[in-house]
Image (cartoon, rainbow, N blue to C red):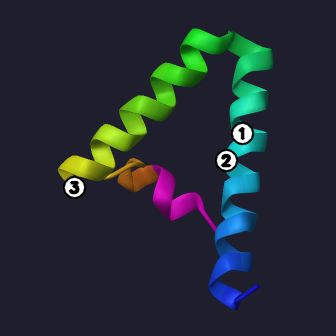
Amino acid sequence: MSDEDTSKDAYFSRVGQLAEAMIAAHGKDFAMGTLVLAARFIAEGKPLIRTSEAKREP
């Protein structure tokens, strides 16, 4: 497996873990809606996080 494939697998795993956490906390509808909305924002070139949140990231 290439470095790129390994990186993609790691991101997919992180998305899966996040989705499972959202389902556990708020249900499947919330998780699906959030992921669809994120995909829409990506397609439209909109930011996925607020500027104030981005500043808090390490």
* Number of marks in picture: 3
The kind of residue tagged 2 is Val
Mark closer to the chain start, 1 or 3? 1
How far apart in space, not on screen, are marks 1 and 3 (Cα)? 22 Å
Indicate whether 37 appears above or below 3: above
The reply to whether dot 2 and dot 3 touch (C-beta < 8 Å) is no
Residue occupying the point 48% across, 59% down: 54
Q: Can you name the residue that lies furthest to the front here?
A: 1
The kind of residue tagged 3 is Gly
Q: Residues within 10 Å of mark 2 (few under 14, many from 20)?
A: few
* Residue hosting label 1: 18
Q: Residues within 10 Å of mark 3 (few under 14, many from 20)?
A: few
* Residue hosting label 2: 15
* Residue hosting label 3: 45
The reply to whether dot 1 and dot 2 touch (C-beta < 8 Å) is yes
In the rendered structure, which segment of residues is drawn in magenta? 53-58
Q: Residues within 10 Å of mark 1 (few under 14, many from 20)?
A: few
**Percent position of residue 17, x then y:** 78, 42
Residue occupying the point 39% across, 49% down: 48
How far apart in space, not on screen, are marks 1 and 2 (Cα)? 5 Å
**Percent position of residue 25, x then y:** 76, 16
